[in-house]
Amino acid sequence: MKEANEKRENRPWKILELVLFVVSLVFFGIVFAQNPKSVDASSLNPFLYWIYALVVFALCVTLFFPLVGAFKSKKKLLRLIILILAVVVIVGGAWMLAPGTPIETNAVTKPNDFKLADTVLYISYLSVVVAICALIWSAIRNAVKK
């Protein structure tokens, strides 16, 4: 009985996941069917807006569930506050370290665009290093446990 309720509760999420996937595939097919010759092609705009929408949706869902769970106990709320502070420190540090040096491009860009791009690159580099360290740590920990 409990399994049937869990399946029934998960059904809307599965349907939403399937709809988002199908719409993404359609946009993907449209872009490659048209085969735009440049990045400035107008056919890429809907695809980019869809990507932005998916990123915003993922961020909202990612933030929603920890927020709901955080108010269930003081320990979870404290963890959430520490996590938010850590993210602010990491992003702020990456922003301060980012040089934002302009480069020669054909597109019209603002100086802050280069600073933002450098910040995102630094955060990406840090994320890759942390992921590799976590992978190595888990492999060592599992080997020691056995």
Image (spheres, rainbow, N blue to C red):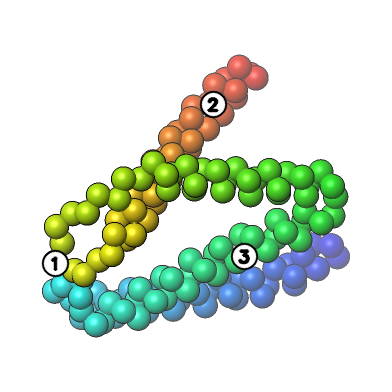
**Where is mark 3, residue-wise?**
61
**In x, y percent, where is residue 127?**
46, 42
Q: Which mark is residue 137?
A: 2
Q: Nearer the viewer, mark 2 or mark 1?
A: 1
Q: Residue at x 31, y 45 (%)?
A: 99
Which amino acid type is marked by label 1?
Asn
Q: Residue at x 15, y 62 (%)?
A: 105
**Where is mark 1, residue-wise?**
106
Please give the count of numbered marks on the rendered protein: 3
Q: Is residue 130 above or below residue 61?
A: above
- Side of 142 relative to 34 (left or right): right
Foreground of the two, 9 or 67? 67
Q: Nearer the viewer, mark 3 or mark 2?
A: 3
- Side of 102 relative to 125 (left or right): left
Local packing at callout 2 (Cα closer than 10 Å; few below 14, some 14-19, many 20+) is few
Which amino acid type is marked by label 2?
Trp
Q: Residue at x 56, y 48 (%)?
A: 88
**In x, y percent, where is residue 123?**
43, 45
| Distance between the alpha carbons at the discs numbered 1 and 3 | 37 Å
Q: Is residue 41 above or below residue 10?
A: below
Question: Where, quadrant-wise, is the C terminus in this rendering?
Answer: top right
Of label 3 and label 2, which has the lower sequence position? Answer: 3
- Side of 63 relative to 137 (left or right): right
Label 1's element?
loop
Which amino acid type is marked by label 3?
Val
Of label 2 and label 1, which has the lower sequence position? Answer: 1
